[in-house]
Amino acid sequence: MKYLVANWKMNQIDFISWQDEFLKNFDNANFKDIKIILCPNSTELAKINDNKIDEFLLGAQDVSRHLDGPFTGQISAKILKNKNVQFCLLGHSEIRAEGETNETVLQKAARLDTEQIEKILCIGESQKVLEKGERNEFLKNQLESFFKSNHKPAFIAYEPIWAIGTGIAANTDSIKDSVDIISKFIKNYFDFSIPILYGGSVSSENIKEIVSITGIEGCLVGNASLDSKEFANIATKI
Ligand code: PGA
């Protein structure tokens, strides 16, 4: 089984035509070997829930660390659940860049657990951390903070920040090194494995090479998922 997560970030798409175009171009219409999770902007969740085919799974991009109440602009795990959201990204670097800490990520994880929404934990180092040779420590810290509180994500998305939205994905050796670090670390904590996804400038050109890396079970796709034809090409080639 392979996994694809579409992260539409703060972009609005015309979902009905996106879905039509995807289905026209996807070459494996029975979805037998692939699970696809769509993560639209929160304002689009209801519309997509009402119109999507059953094979698409629904994900959110973020959740509030609060239960409910006066938190303008935020969305609670309970509201997500009411919209039939099954997955939620957690710790995406674009949200960490706005001030989210490992501690906040844990609070959000607890809210999602209460509503039984599956977590897609995003981790990844910056260019600076990479250049300083501190990637191992950095990834381990992000994972340790999460695992020691006994939260189990459905997926770990390894997304090197320097590869996100740049058009230049990490090379296979670099992804392999990170997958090794992450899978060894998972083994220390759990007696089961957690699927690892790669994210950062994934396209129909590089998808095959990326998913051929041992330990990579799918991808998180930003930019290239906005174009449903390109996303269908990715899904076909995976
Ligand atoms: P990208 O984004 O595919 O546009 O690099 C990936 C992500 O941020 O999840």
Image (cartoon, rainbow, N blue to C red):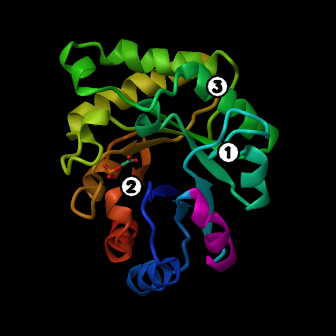
Q: Position of residue 25 (x, y in %)?
A: 38, 83
Q: Measuring from the top left, give residue 92's x and y in whole percent.
A: 46, 38
Q: Which residue is mark 1?
A: 118
Region in magenta: 42-52
Q: Which residue is mark 2?
A: 221
Q: Is residue 98 above or below residue 216?
A: above
Q: Earlier in the sequence, mark 3 or mark 1?
A: 3
Residue 168 marker: none
Query: Left of 201 or right of it: where is 75?
Result: right
What residue sits 74% from the left and 36% below the top?
A: 111
- The answer to whether the beta carbon of the residue marked 2 is less than 8 Å from any atom of ligand 1 is yes
Q: Quadrant of residue 38?
A: bottom right
| Mark-to-mark CA distance, 1 and 2 | 18 Å
93 relative to 65 in the view: left or right:
left
Q: Residue at 48% of width from left, 86% of height from top?
A: 20
Q: Earlier in the sequence, mark 3 or mark 2?
A: 3
Check disc 1: other Cα within 10 Å, few if <14, some if 14-19, many if 20+. Answer: many
* Residue at the spot 44% in from the left edge and 32% down from the top edge: 98
Asked whether 222 or 198 is in front, the reply is: 222
Say whether residue 238 is visible. no
In space, the residues marked 3 and 1 are separated at their CA atoms by 14 Å
Q: How many marks?
A: 3
Ligand 1 within 8 Å of disc 1? The answer is: no
Q: Is residue 216 visible in the rendered structure shown here?
A: yes
Give, as a three-letter code, the residue at label 2: Val
Q: What is the number of the mark on residue 106?
A: 3
Q: At numbered mark 3, what does the secondary structure look like: helix, strand or loop?
A: helix
Q: Are marks 3 and 1 in contact (CB under 8 Å)?
A: no
Task: Examine the structure image and report whether residue 149 is included in the region drawn in magenta.
Answer: no
Q: Nearer the viewer, mark 3 or mark 2?
A: 3
